[in-house]
Structure formats: structure tokens, C-alpha cells
Amino acid sequence: MPVQKVNDSSDLDAKVPSHLQRTSITSLTMTSEPSHRCVKATVVHKGPVISCAQKDGIEMLRAEIKEEDPLQRTAEHTSINVIFFGTLAKDFSQSARQGDVVLLADFTIKKSPSFLRDKLHPCQLEMDGKDDFVYVCPSAGPSHGPSSSEAKYTYVPLNDLKPRTVVNVYGVVTFFKQPFPSKGSDYCSTLKITDQSDVKVGCNIFSKKLEDHPILFRVGDIIRLHRFKTDVFRDSMSLLNTFGWSTVTFDGTTDSPVVPRTSSKSFHFGESDIRTVQELRQWAANQSWISNDLKVSLSMVKPGMYFDLTCQLLAKAVMDSRCILLKVWDGTKCQHPLLNVAVASDALEGESTVVKDRMNLTANVLVYDNHLEVARELKPGTFLQFYNLHALLQRAPDQQPDQSEHLSFHLHGGTSYGRGLRSLPAESPALQSLKSVLEKHVDLVEYDEVNDGTLLEIWYTPPEAVVRTCEHNTRRLTLARVKRSTPPLSCHVRARVKKYKPQQLYQCLKLFCSNCKTMEDVPDDSAVAKVFRESAKDSQPCDEQWAATSSASSREPGRTISMHISRDMVGESTHMQLIFIEGTTLDEICVLSRDYKNLVPVRSVNSRMTLMDLTAPFLFSGDKRYYGCKKCSLNTFQNPVFTGVETWDEQAVAKALGVQLMQYRLLIQFELEDQTDTLEALLWENTERFFHVSAVDASGSQDLQDKIQTIMDTIQPPDSSLEERPWLDLCLSVYSVKDDDRNKVCYQITNTEIKEE
DNA sequence: GATTAGGTTTTG
């Protein structure tokens, strides 16, 4: 049966066959017997006709219908999804529009697959068009859509209320309490409203569900009440929610957008609502009761005052089971000295307020008793509205009686005078002026973050461990800011060392080839000793024309130790500066190197002198060993030239041998930390200046390696807590490197040195 | 189709 149309809603009722019984949507369950039931409801949403792949491409349409007769309405499940299949889907799409009233019968009741998501109704109705029964009554008026249904609500002016009737009203809120637990089973919201008639009407709303209570932020908000029962109480009219009730609230700021606030998934809201809200706003703006109470800032607070405060939460701390401390600000400076409630830093949640405290910007609010439930859930950064906050003078526990008292703030227990607090959504029009004031303090926030360390340092740590040596005076940034910055960049940070690598500091010594940029660890002695052992095995002393050789047999049979000196050098002052040595162990060359300036270990291959594998040092010079780069060293040893050098050092030796000298470098990776973030920074190009130690000297000196360890122990004392570690003023270089074709941002500590006494 | 509260004179 196709969709049938009627002209009047009452005609619909006449169409109900006698064997069918009207049923309410709310009462539908999976076990309802549908065959003798029908529902009547308004189409609040009509989807497009779609083709359902899972059902062989059959066409289907989803509509949401809502119980129309207010008498049938309860708070829950007044709407339900209806799925039309096949030709009925197309038929319904053409015949019905949003706002139309429909009468449906012979549907199938199925479990709603979307209930968890849309919370509409546990069931859905399905209609496939065979025996189904669909009547549509177009909504009144030329226009369709949401506005068409609003004609069904009439709003009674507050001076026209008659006792014991159920009404819909609009009003401006002149007083309200946040919902509080009643002595019965529900939460109770108590409010007073007024309208252009200037009559004030009290209103109580009871509901077990907090989210069903009106969302009120401040006096002057506008509220729409549907289905409230009137009665007379103490000679004036009062309102109480009754079955099918609902509330929607609006901000009262004139010229701000009219945005309905409700937890309800579906509600009537149209042009006439917008008009009504705007008219009430306009009227209320000129009323004296909506006074400047709303706009009390910290700068205006006088001792003894009760006032409403709009502010931002900076930090919080639980004081005891009946009291929570909230540290807040509104960006204005109080004229009276503000009390600072001292709290252990580990008990405080949120940012430090040290700098704002100093500037008399932080209000310490003690929140008591029933308000803890709300206060506990608040997160620092949240915007807050306090109601009936009490400013009072107090002496801090450690204050002398002759000192001036400081202003503290108490949110007393109970709900008298609407006492309470709640968070405000960041987009709330009531917050716009607060936010613009706070934005003027952006620098302060930054300053605060980095300078809290200054105080901690004065209290907890010895004098500065490092100094910056850079000339530039770039801004000091928090680590979080540094991470957000775009390289290349130089900046200053104040941070502590959380961790560093390598923990075994001798491992920070690296070999670096400036030619191919290879970096490697210094080979350990066992690897070097092995190269020596293998080179000495079964070898006959080499015999080079250019060299003068002397040999001696070692303790081990078959191993000969030979020393070679270039004939070119004989007769020159340099002749004892460079000696080639063959057939020794690592230990032996170490002993010999105490007496000879430059010893080059060599081996013999077919009687020709050859350098050892470059895993081993190519040069021993006193305490130091020098390595060559395996990749970049040229083999020019065949015809070495030893003339024209006055003083042999590692550079000259490397050049004469065709070796690419590897440099010693020190590399440490720090994990820096400040109040905002952590960041991994390398100490690399600046390491020698940082420690006042040269890498090559450190390579041969246990004393210098100990010095580096001692310095590291001062900037990150072993087993220290974070608070015990000194703050370091560091210069950071932010740069990017190509890593597998991707740009990777790196950080290096530059221009910073350890301070030496 | 009950009951709750029905602004309040606060206070650590």
C-alpha cells in the first residue's frame, strides 16, 4: 500500500482502523506485539533514499520520528528510527517532509543498531511496503523543516500564568543554583526567572540525571521551559517540571549568536526562538538587576565582599577531605595583597604560579564541602565561574600579627545564595573579555615557565654550573617552544639534565673522519692487540732500500723485533723522531712509546714494509694513539717521502704515509628537561670548550677523563632527584639534517662552557 | 504520576 496523505492531523486519528491500538514510542520494546499497534509522530529527520549493498541493492530510507502528542512524552526514547524499504522508501521520500505528522502501522520492531551511538531508542521500526500502512499529514504553513513545528508551542507571559496548568515559558534567569542533591531521590535546580512583564517566578526542576538540568552559567542567561506545572507558593506563582518536560538555555549577551544549550539530542528550535531570545536579551540589558555584579574582577574586590568571579584555573591542590585549594587568575591585579597558600610542589597540580604570585595576580580560593565534587574534576587551564565567592582578610600562618593581612577567597559549603562553581566552555561569550585580558599576559606565561627555575635554583642548588659565552642575546625559550620552532635557529634555554648517554663516559670518545664524516668508537685494546699478534706471526723483517734497520730477537722463538729509520733522515735533526717498528706486541710498543716520540707499527709482506690493518693505530706518540680512516687513507706507503719536515707530528706522519688522520671527538647526548617538555640535545662540536678538555688529550689521560666525569657529576649528580639538579643556561642550535631523505630536526648545545672556579 | 524545594542573610 502506497503512502497516503491526509490534510488534517485529526483526520489521521480517523484513519486508525478499529483493530489497531495507538501506542507511544517510549513504550515500544523488542517484545512488543506490533501487529495491532500503530504510532503517530512527527518526522524530525528524513534521510535520502540509498541503495543497500548488503540487501541486494534494495532501496532504503531512514527517517527519525518523534512522539507528537506532548501528553505522551516522557524524557526518554520519544524518538525512534524508521527504515523504509523498496518502493515504500521512494514513496515516502516523495510524500513526506520534515515536520509532517505520520501515522504508521504494521511495522516490524527490530533492535536499533545505532542505539549506542544516537541514544535515540533501543528499537527501530522497519517497513517493507507489503501490508504496511503509512499516512502522512503535511505540517501547517507554507514552509517545512524545523521551523514548521514551532507553531505547536505557545509561550505564556509570566504575568499570565494560571495556577495548576501545564505551560511553556521563556524567561531571563535572575537567580539560580547549580543542581544539588535534594533530600529525595533527585538533583534539584532552583531558579528564578522574569520576562518583559517584570513578574518574577520561582522554578524548581527535579531530575535524577544531572545532564537533564538546565545549563546555566550566569544571571542573565535565558531559559525556555517546556511542560512545566504552575502552582501558587507563598502568594506567588511557581513552576515545577512535569512529565515530558525539557529546558533549553541561551547566553544572555546581546548580539552574541543564539546557540541553544541542551543535552537533548532532538528539540524544537526555530526562527521564533531566536526572535524571543533576542527580545529578552534586549529587554534585560536595560534592567537594573542585571547589574555590574557580573563584571567584578579581582582588581575590584574589596575585603568582605561576596561576588561572582569569572577566571581561569592555574593550579589545584587537595588540602584535606573537606577542602581543595584552587589557584586562579583573571589577569587583573588585586588592589589588596593576596594571600598565598603554600603547598608542597608535588601536591600541586598545574603550572607554577610563582611569577603571578609575585605580581599579585593569583587568587587562592579555598573550596569547601559539597563543592569538592565539582572542584575535584577541574583541570588546570579550565575557565571557571564562581558564584557567591567570599573575599576575606586573613593572616598567613607564618605571618607576624603586626603585618598587614592578605586577601583570601572562600567558597563556603552549602548552596545558599547560589554558592557554587562550574567550568565554562572556552567559547562561552561570557569569557571573551577575560580571554582578551589574559592574552595580554602571554609574555608573562612564558616568563613564568622559564623563571620558576630561577627561584628553585636559589633555594636548592649551588652556584651556576655553566656559563654561556655567546654574544647574541636571543630570547630564552621553553623546551616546548624550541620543539615547535622551525630550524635553523639559535636560542637560549634553561633546563636540567634528565639523562645523558653514554653512561660509561670513556665511550663518549669517538674517532671522526673529517673527510668522509665517518664516526666510530675507539677500538678497544683486545682488538688492537689481536692485529699486532697477527702481524708479528711468522714474519721476516722487511727490507726497504729507503730504511736503515736494526733487529733483535724477541723472547718468543721465531719473532723478531725490528726498528727502521728512513735513510733520508739520517744526519738530520729529525732522525730519531720517526721510527718504524715491526714484530712487537701491543704491550711492547706501549712500553717503547714512552722513550720514542713517534712509533709507526708496520708489518712485512713479501719483505716489503706495509702498514698494519687500520683497526690498529698507525702511530703511537707518547700516551696517544692515532688512527687512520679505513675508507679515506691512500696507500702511498710504497715510496714514502720523509724530507722537508722539521718537526714530526701526527699530521706530518699521516701525510707522509698517505693516511687520512682521524680526529678524536667527544660526543654526549643529553636529555634536557624543563617545566614544559624534554628534548634530546647533542654536545658535539662544542664539547671541548664545554669541558675545557681536548678530546685527543683525554684519549691518553685518565685524569682528563676523570675531569669530564666530575663535571657530569655536578650537572647531573648520581642518584639525585630532579629538584637537586642544577638549572643550566644553555645556548642551543636547532638545525635539520637529511636522514633517509627525510629532514630530521637536531639540537646541539653550543656556546656554553662549564664554569671553573 | 510520591518525594525532593520553595533563593538567603553565609564564615573553615
Image: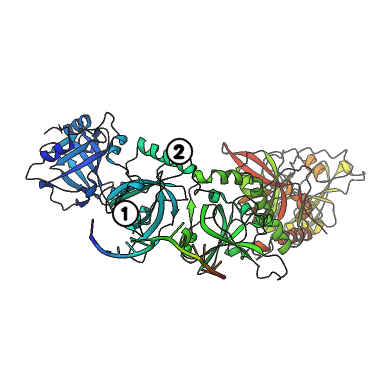
Contact (Cβ within 8 Å) of mark 2 with mark 1? no
From the image, which quarter does the N terminus of chain A lie in? top left
> Percent position (x, y) of residue A206?
34, 58
Tell which of A33 and A484 is nearer to you. A33
Indicate which disc residue A651 carries. none
Q: Which residue is mark 1?
A: A241
Instruction: Spot the residue most to the front.
Output: A235
Of mark 2 and mark 1, the one earlier in the sequence is 1
Q: Residue at x 35, y 58 (%)?
A: A235
Q: Quadrant of residue A465?
A: bottom right
Asked which secondary structure carries label 2, the reply is loop
Structural distance between the alpha carbons of marks 2 and 1: 27 Å
Residue A75 in sight here: no
| Residue type at the position of mark 1 | Asn
Q: Position of residue A40 (x, y in %)?
A: 18, 42
Residue drawn at point x = 67 percent, y = 38 percent = A488
Give the residue type that dot 2 points to: Pro
* Res A645 → quadrant: top right
Q: Is residue A158 visible?
A: yes
Q: Nearer the viewer, mark 2 or mark 1?
A: 1
Relative to the observer, which residue lies in front, A382 or A148? Answer: A148
Which residue is at a point 50% across and 48% down the rendered structure image? A290
Residue ID for mark 2? A257
